[in-house]
Image (cartoon, helix red, strand yellow):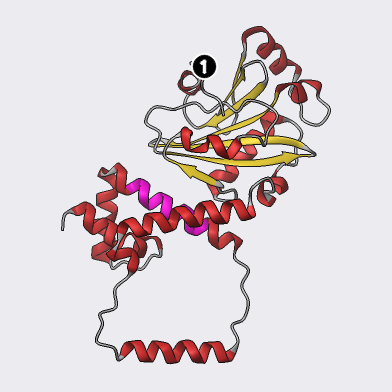
Amino acid sequence: MNDCQKTQYIITDAVDNRLSELDRNFFENHIEVCPTCRSDYELDSLTKDFIQSKIVRHKTPDNVIRRINQEIERQATSDRPAKSVFAAYPLARAAIIAMLVIGTAFAIYFLNSPDLQNTVQAADMMDQSIENYSSFLAGTIQPAEIGRSVDELREFFRDHVDFPVALKPVKECEWVGGVLSDYEGIPLAHLVYKMPAGIIYVFQANWNEVRSGNKLYLSNGAIASLNQTGWYVNRTQDGHSVVMWLYDDKTICTAVSSMEESQLRDLFATETNTDRY
């Protein structure tokens, strides 16, 4: 068994914090040097956090507990070895995780994301972008759809927003997540890029809605810069870079990250008409 196979074998225990100190040291050292295993671990952890955040706990009836205990005792006397399905079949683990993410996400989030709707309080789009970015870092907001490329998110946004969503392939992106929400009837799109250096969050809305200032708005300086150059760049006191740009003259995009403003802008400076839903 090579290091990747061993890592995949114990990845579920790692997510659940059940590893011994020896296995934990091995696991942490391996995912530091193996991007594939690290991405799998982050995806598994994200899935667990997302599902747990939506679980409503109820007291299990006593008769059900008794039946479970009886079944456990019966299995304990069996000659069959007890082995985790996830550990024995890594592909099954990946498939089940994918189904849980997609199925649970669509049932709970699709067009009705309570976490995001509760978060969207400020009408200023730049302020809200920074607040949502912090919420993603803290795990308060979780992506509803996750894929290894933007192509996997196209169907997620299709027919549910009234503006072209900028789905920019980003170099060295480990995975990208998407969320749909609305603010007082205005549909919004959210993308989260997981990079080796950290998270990039992109908030998108109908440019005409924001420019009108009825429900969402921007400062006069930001609007003037966007109208003149198509870009607006800012650096907050907390060290966050904020880059705004217009996509297809119909969509206002706001990217937030801890990277330098010029580096963040360069990632999205080559938008084309093909990078849409």
At 65% from the left and 23% from the top, the residue drawn is 252
At 24% from the left and 87% from the top, the residue drawn is 79
- 134 displayed left or right of 43: right
Magenta stretch: helix, strand or loop mostly? helix
At 57% from the left and 52% from the top, the residue drawn is 105
Position of residue 143 relative to residue 197, above or below, is below
**Which residue is at the front of the view, 77 or 227?**
77
Considering the image in quadrants, where does the N terminus appear?
Answer: bottom left
Is 105 a magenta residue?
A: no
Is 45 a magenta residue?
A: yes
Can residue 133 be seen here? The reply is no
Residue at the disc numbered 1? 272
Secondary structure beneath dot 1 equals loop
Residue 189 in the image: x percent, y percent?
63, 35
Mark 1, other Cα within 10 Å: few <14 / some 14–19 / many ≥20: few
Task: Give the image quarter of residue 64.
Answer: bottom right
Position of residue 257 relative to residue 78, above or below, is above
Can residue 109 be seen here? The reply is yes
Residue 140 in the image: x percent, y percent?
59, 51
**Which residue is at the front of the view, 162 or 190?**
162
Q: Residue at the right extreme?
A: 214
> What span is colored magenta in the figure?
38-49
Q: Residue at the left extreme?
A: 1
As shown in the figure, which amino acid type bears the numbered disc 1?
Thr
- 131 displayed left or right of 271: right
